[in-house]
Amino acid sequence: MSKGINISNSVIRRLPRYYRFLGELEKQNISKISSRELSERMRLTASQIRQDLNCFGGFGQQGYGYNVSELRTAIGHILGVDKHRKTILIGAGNLGTALAVHINFEKSGCKLIGIFDSNKSIIGSPLGEHTILDIDNLEAFCKAEKPEIAVLCIPTSAAKAIVDRLTKLGIHSFWNFSHFDICTEHSDITVENVHLGDSLLTLSYGVNNRNTSEKK
């Protein structure tokens, strides 16, 4: 990454999309692509793509374009997909279960090493490749395994206490599906908040706006 450059959040959020599109190109056995061709596939401008990638150093060659595999590997390294950081999941309800079973954590730079819940009736039950652990054993587990990331699939009412416990145990990175605003309590953390309801409302706005335009 280029030193001294403040990378905007919008650029960072486009990186996973570049990574995904380049992966699709690899599956199609496409070995090189120009910024113009990539822009047409991604519906971005070629200038935007070049500006985004220039934030992280020089990629591509004039008159040749980008080597698909090399660029994808480089972006993957920037995203940290090769790190496999130890990750725990808190909350083995419907959402937690779906994530544990259907998300390939290792493809995103994480390695799920433990799943915790407070519901005594499911503790000890299998979930994917793991066994649901008692949240009461969180401290001992974290001190032994030293996870870096926590996935929160818990009610808002329980989130503050869990986050306080986790930060004291050295975890400062969260994939947060609760509605608790972690940043208001802890400023030294990295968090990705996921509000599924907000996403659906955004879709609803798009549909509503399209229908309104069609009626004019």
Image: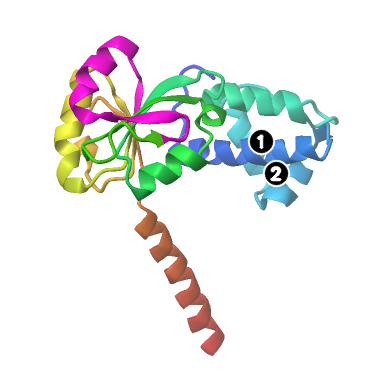
The residue lying at 47 percent from left, 35 percent from top is 128
Q: Position of residue 79 (x, y in %)?
A: 53, 27
Mark 1 — residue?
50
Q: Which residues are magenta?
A: 127-150
Q: Quadrant of residue 112?
A: top left
Q: Residues within 10 Å of mark 2 (few under 14, many from 20)?
A: some
Report the front residue among 120 and 207: 120
Q: Residue furthest top?
A: 144
Does the segment drawn in magenta span residue 44? no
When the figure is inspected, residue 137 is found, relative to residue 51, above or below; the finding is above
Q: Residues within 10 Å of mark 1 (few under 14, many from 20)?
A: some
User: Dot 2 lies on which element?
Assistant: helix
Q: Position of residue 169 (x, y in %)?
A: 22, 18
Report the front residue among 160 and 113: 113
Q: State if disc 2 and disc 1 touch (CB < 8 Å).
A: yes
Q: Position of residue 133 (x, y in %)?
A: 29, 28
- The answer to whether residue 105 is visible is yes
- The answer to whether residue 194 is visible is no
Report the front residue among 105 and 79: 105
In the image: residue 161, left or right of residue 206: left
Q: Position of residue 207 (x, y in %)?
A: 49, 74
Residue 46 circle label: 2
User: Dot 1 lies on which element?
Assistant: helix
Q: Amino acid at mark 1?
A: Arg
Q: Amino acid at mark 2?
A: Ala
